[in-house]
Amino acid sequence: MRLILWILCVLAPLTLAQGADPVVAKVGKINLTRAYFDLQWEYFTHQALIRQGIPYTAEAAETLKDFKPRLLERLAKDRAVINVAERQGFAASDAAVNEQIDAVRGRFENEEAFQAGLKEAGLRDLAGYRLLVYEALTFNAFMDDLVGRIEISVPAMKVLYYLNRAQFSRPARYCSSHILVETPAQAQAVLTRLAKGEAFEALAKEFSIDPGTQAEGGDLGCYPLGNLIEPFERAMVRLKVGETTRTPVKTEFGYHIIRLNKVEPMAYAPFEVVQESLSSNLLESTIDKLIDNYARLEGVQLFPENL
C-alpha cells in the first residue's frame, strides 16, 4: 500500500502566531500560521507543477489556488498525527535527521549545488529542509508502527468481498469476426461464397479492407458491449454463436459481414485473485479513518479565511 504522506511538505517551524501573522489552523496546542502555510504552499505548487512538466512561476502557481483549503485540511490532519507520534516517543532524533540530510547532500557536487537544488524543489533554506526531514521521519516511524499492528482478517475480507461482489465482476464479452468491404456488391459476393461453404477466415484475408484484422482472418477479439460502433453491435447481438449476418451491415467504415464466435458470460473475479488488492484497500481505508480520529481527538480548527 502506498501511503500519501502529505507531511513531506512541511517546511517551517510551528510557532504561536505573533504580530500580523494570522492563524490559519489550530491543532491541539499548536497554531499553524499563514507564514507557515505560505511556505507549505510554495513547496506544494513547485512539486505539482514539476509533475506536470510546467516551469514554476508565480502565475502558474496561482492557477492552483483552489487547492488551498484542501491542503490546509491535510496539513492540519498530518500535524495531529505528528502530535500523537511525538507524545508516543516516535520523534526523529537529530542523528537520524542529519543522516538523511547528509545522504541527500552527497548526491550533489558541492554545497552550492545542494542549496540550488533545495530552492528548485521549492524549499527556501536548509532550516526548512531540516524540519521537513524531521517531520517526515517522525510521521513515517509512527505510521509504520501503526500499520504493523493492524490485522486484516481473511474472514472479514471475504464478508466484504461478497457484499461488494459486483465491483469485482467482469461484464459479458462478445467475441466476433468481420469482413469489411467498400460496396454492397462486394459484400454480396462474399456472402455468396460463404453460402457455398468457403471459409470465413480465408475470405477475410482475401477481401477485407480492415488492416487490423485482415491477416487474422477477420478476428476482432472479445469486448463488452459499448466498445464497438452501434450498428455493428446491434447486428452482432442478434446472432447466435457461430452464425453470420445474412445481409451486409453498413457503417461509416463500409459494409461488414459479421460472425459471432463466442459469448463469454459475466464472471466474478475469484476472492483469491482480488484478496491482495482488497487487503491493501482496507488497510488504506483504516489508516484514513485513524488519521481522521487523531485529528478529532487533538481538536482541529481551520480558518481558511486567513489564507
Image (cartoon, helix red, strand yellow):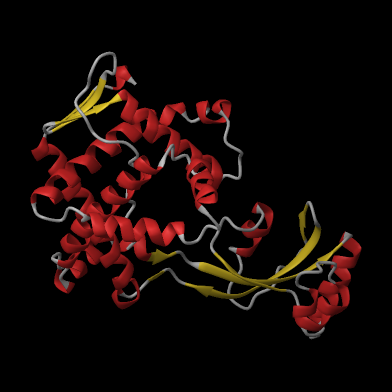
Q: Position of residue 129 (x, y in %)?
A: 37, 45
Q: Nearer the viewer, residue 151 or 45?
A: 45
In the displayed structure, does residue 66 sit left or right of residue 284? right
Q: For the N terminus, give its image quadrant.
A: bottom left
Q: Residue at x 32, y 36 (%)?
A: 12
For residue 40, side relative to residue 154 (left or right): right
Residue 246 in view, yes or no? no
Residue 230 appears in the figure: yes
- The quarter of the picture where residue 250 lies is bottom right
The residue sitting at 77% across, 64% down in the picture is 256
Write the residue at 29% across / 74% down: 271
Question: The C terminus is located in which quarter?
Answer: top left
Q: How many marks?
A: 0
* Relative to 288, residue 156 above or below: below
Residue 3 location in percent, x, y? 32, 56
Q: Between residues 255 and 5, which one lies in front from this camera angle?
A: 5
Residue 280 appears in which quarter of the rendering? bottom left
Q: Nearer the viewer, residue 166 or 242?
A: 166
Q: Residue at x 33, y 25 (%)?
A: 35
Which residue is most to the top?
Answer: 20
When the figure is inspected, residue 34 is found, relative to residue 175, above or below; the finding is above
Q: Is residue 279 left or right of residue 307?
A: left
Q: Position of residue 15 (x, y in %)?
A: 21, 30
What is the x, y in percent for residue 290?
A: 16, 50
Eyeballing the image, is 150 above or below 66?
Answer: below
